[in-house]
Image (cartoon, helix red, strand yellow):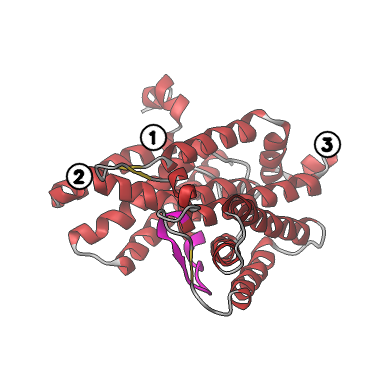
Amino acid sequence: MEKLKNNPLIKAIGTQRLVALLALIVIYLAFGIMNPRFATYNTMVNIFDASYYIGFMAIGICFVIATGGIDLSIGTVLTMSGLVAGYLSVNMGFPIWLVIIICILIGTAFGVVNGLLVAKMGLPPFIATLGTMMLSKGIGSIITGAQSVTWKSGSDPEGWYRAIFKIKTESGLLIPTGFLFLIAAAVIMAVVMNKTKAGRYILSLGSNKEATRLSGVNVDKYLIIAYIISGTFAGIAGLAYSTIYSTLLPGGGAGFEMDAIAGVVIGGTSMSGGIGTIAGTMIGVFIISVLKTGLPFVGLQTHYQQVATGLVIIVAVFADVYRNRRKS
């Protein structure tokens, strides 16, 4: 066992990330065996489609969880960003390039608000982001008049934005270009977390906030940065969701954050803070996406996916608690 732990490959990947990667492979193969129609190219594209909005939210909230905090607002901020931006495009004629920027900036604005509430006003992250979750949910409905919003189709002259996440060739082949976008974002943010001063200080906040403060670090600044990152990626997730699924419903998005949090925790980020892994988060996101896509293939509907996700979260958090107890 000791030899296994000291294996260079396992050390490089990380035990929990390796377990998550193996679990992803096993789950995918299991669905393919139970229903051969699952192991097709189109199903793989559907898995990627489900992974985009979860993945972007997960990248952002990974930074918040690494501080020992939480952001419950990302799901409704995703929906609000897509609703408001789509409304500006369809009902008010805003150009699509400006709509894309606005969609992302709405998320950033909520990230700033969350950061200020937690860092400057001293509110518990759970309460602060629960409040902004309700705010974003209500504001989106008010601005759109409680009406659903459908973004412009690919046949529209301004429908070029859809190629960011998916291209359909003349032969009907679907190319999931969003996968490259998601992986590029993950690589960049992994570098930010592990190789930059901001990333190291954010991780330090989760390890020991008071010690970080006493060492001369402006803890409020880096706490706010973590929430801004989370909000910005919620806005990007809103763009991804609007591009793939087109229609957004007022008051929606509540519960999306749980898929993102599950991906982060499954991947090995500690809920108590101090440990964050973007690579592991991506593995966790694809586990959730495979479950969401695969369960209907074996005759189980969405509510079963929620049960499966809940069980996976419990196991992942238990593993994190057990790991922390062994360290202490």
Instruction: Say which element carries label 3.
Output: loop
Residue density around tag 1, few if under 14, some if 14–19, many if 20 or more, within 10 Å: some
* Residue drawn at the location 52% of the way across and 74% of the way down: 250
Name the spot of residue 21 as percent of width and height, x first.
36, 38
Please say if 171 is above or below 317: above
Q: To which quarter of the image does residue 19 belong?
A: top left
Q: Earlier in the sequence, mark 1 or mark 2?
A: 1
* Residue drawn at the location 24% of the way across and 42% of the way down: 171
Please say if 143 is above or below 21: below
Q: Nearer the viewer, residue 259 or 106?
A: 106
Quarter of the figure that contains the C terminus: top right
Name the spot of residue 212 as percent of width and height, x first.
78, 40
CA gap between label 1 and label 2 equals 23 Å
Instruction: In the rendered structure, find residue 215 and report the number of the disc placed on it.
Output: 3
Residue highlighted by disc 2: 39
| Residue 318 falls left or right of residue 176 | right
Q: Is residue 244 magenta?
A: yes
Please say if 16 is above or below 155: above
Instruction: Say which element carries label 1.
Output: helix
Instruction: In the rendered structure, find residue 18 and report the number of the disc placed on it.
Output: 1
Residue density around tag 2, few if under 14, some if 14–19, many if 20 or more, within 10 Å: some
Instruction: Say which element carries label 2.
Output: loop
Q: In the image, what residue type sits under mark 3?
A: Ser
Magenta extent = 243-257
Q: In the image, what residue type sits under mark 2?
A: Ala
* Residue 27 at least partly seen: no
Q: Nearer the viewer, mark 3 or mark 2?
A: 2
